[in-house]
Every structure is written in structure tokens, then in C-alpha cells.
Amino acid sequence: MQLSKDTTDFIDVIDSYSEGKLRKKNDLGTCFEICASYSGEQELQTLVFQSKILWNLSKKLRSTTKVDKGIELIQKEFESSLTQIRDILNQIADKLADDDKERFNDIYLGMTKGNVLNIIDLSHDFGIFKDMQAEIQKHKA
């Protein structure tokens, strides 16, 4: 998908804020572009919020063992966030051209471990955006 100059400039700002650590820069841009094109602000806000949750839970899951107390609750919350993110990514994919839709489906919407890892990477990027938003709000106050 060809992104608008406004979107690419916006993603460049996020990438600069992250010091070049975005993992799914083009797909992050696609999500912003598609949501902006159909007034999907609510979906985008939910995607950003759930992505931050998923990213934090994935970091927690990597640092725990299967016998740690409360691991089942963390896994349940992880799965819930993953489902919500998948639902929104599916809505976004439905608005893409056929080639882009197929690529998006292959990368994010399957049921493989690779698909989950790709969603975690995209969630990482949305988490950086959420951090940037919070920092801007802090400086406004």
C-alpha cells in the first residue's frame, strides 16, 4: 500500500522518537492510514491501547516460568488482548486492496506462532507510539 506523505512523515516522527527501533514500520503506517481514511479513530485507539497491554504482557510472559504464581491470569489477558488486536487488524485488512489484504492476512491473521510474533512486533511499535503520546501529554500539563 502506498502511504500518504502525512502518514510517512508521522511514522518517521515515531521512528525518530524510538531511535530507529520500530519493527513493523510499514504496517504501522498502513494501520494509521487505513484508520484515518474511514474515520476509524475508535478502532485505532483500541488498537493502540490493546497493543500496549499485549506488549507488556509478552515481556512479562518471557520472564516467567510455567510454575510462577498467576501465570494463568497473565496468559488469559494476553489471549484476550491478542483476540481484540486480531479483530481490528482483520477490519483493517478488509479495507486493503487484494494483494495487500493477502499479505496482511498471511503476516498477522493466521493461527501460527509466527503470526503471534508478528502481532507482538506490531504491538511493540504501537506501544512506542503510546509512550510518545504519554510523554507529549505530560509536557502539556
Image (cartoon, rainbow, N blue to C red):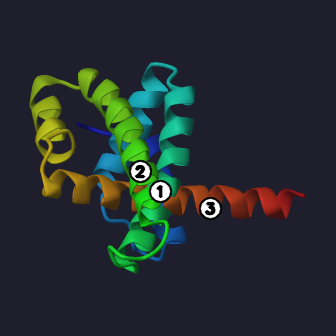
Circle number at residue 76 = 2
Q: Secondary structure at mark 3?
A: helix
Residue plotted at (39% across, 70% down)? 61
**Crowding near the residue tagged with mark 1, few <14, some 14–19, many ≥20 C-alpha atoms within 10 Å:** few
Q: Quadrant of the N terminus?
A: top left
Q: Position of residue 102 (x, y in %)?
A: 10, 33
Residue plotted at (56% across, 37% down)? 45
- The residue nearer to you, when weighing 10 against 51, is 51
Of tags 3 and 1, which is closer to the observer? 1
Q: Secondary structure at mark 1?
A: helix
Residue 80 in view:
yes
Callout 2 touching callout 3 (CB < 8 Å) = no
- The residue nearer to you, when weighing 109 against 126, is 109
Residue pointed to by mark 3: 132
Residue pointed to by mark 1: 73
Among the two numbered marks 3 and 1 on one chain, the one whose residue lies closer to the N terminus: 1
Q: Secondary structure at mark 2?
A: helix
Residue type at mark 3? Met
Disc 1 to disc 2, C-alpha distance: 5 Å
Circle number at residue 93 = none
Q: State which quadrant residue 141 falls in.
A: bottom right
Residue type at mark 1? Leu
Q: State which quadrant residue 140 falls in.
A: bottom right
